[in-house]
Amino acid sequence: MKKFAFLALGVVFAAGTPALAKGPAASERAAEKKPGMDQADPIECRKFQEIGSRLKIKRICMSRSEWAAQAREDRMNIERSQVARGLGPT
């Protein structure tokens, strides 16, 4: 039984070693590509109250460009729904 445990432990360590070797390089590349890391595009956090609760507040953090893209997408969805509402059967 001990031999099996040591064998399983050895397999886990052997399989985990390449993943650890790739970890820092992958995280460095991810840090380079994050839009919020640039000073020209700082991260903003906004608080939103949960619907149906007086106390629960959700905090969402995104970069300014991501907030602008979210606002554009929300505006397009609202306009699309308003136009579609007028196209129903008469």
Image (cartoon, rainbow, N blue to C red):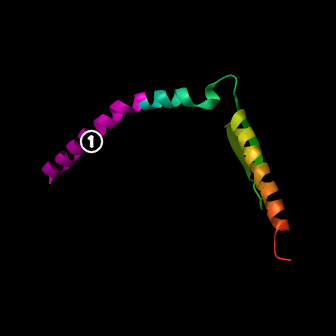
Residue drawn at 75 percent across, 41 percent down: 46
Q: Residue furthest top?
A: 39
Q: Is residue 24 magenta?
A: yes
Near-viewer residue (66 or 8)? 66
Overall secondary structure of the magenta stretch? helix
**Which quadrant would the N terminus be assigned to in this image?**
bottom left
Q: Is residue 39 above or below residue 51?
A: above
Residue 14 appears in which quarter of the rendering?
A: top left
Q: Residue furthest bottom?
A: 90
Q: Is residue 13 above or below residue 8?
A: above
Q: Is residue 34 magenta?
A: no
Image coords of residue 53 (percent x, y): 77, 59
Residue drawn at 30 percent across, 35 percent down: 18
Image coords of residue 29 (percent x, y): 48, 28
Image coords of residue 52 (percent x, y): 77, 62
Image coords of residue 80 (percent x, y): 78, 57
Q: Which residue is mark 1?
A: 15
**Which quadrant would the C terminus be assigned to in this image?**
bottom right
The total of numbered circles placed on residues is 1
Near-viewer residue (23 or 34)? 34
Taking 48 as reference, is 24 left or right? left
The secondary element bearing badge 1 is classed as helix
Near-viewer residue (5 or 28)? 28
Residue 49 seen: no
The region drawn magenta spans 1-25
Residue drawn at 85 percent across, 67 percent down: 86
Taking 50 as reference, is 7 left or right? left
Residue type at mark 1: give it: Ala
Residue 60 appears in which quarter of the rendering?
A: top right
Residue 11 appears in which quarter of the rendering?
A: top left
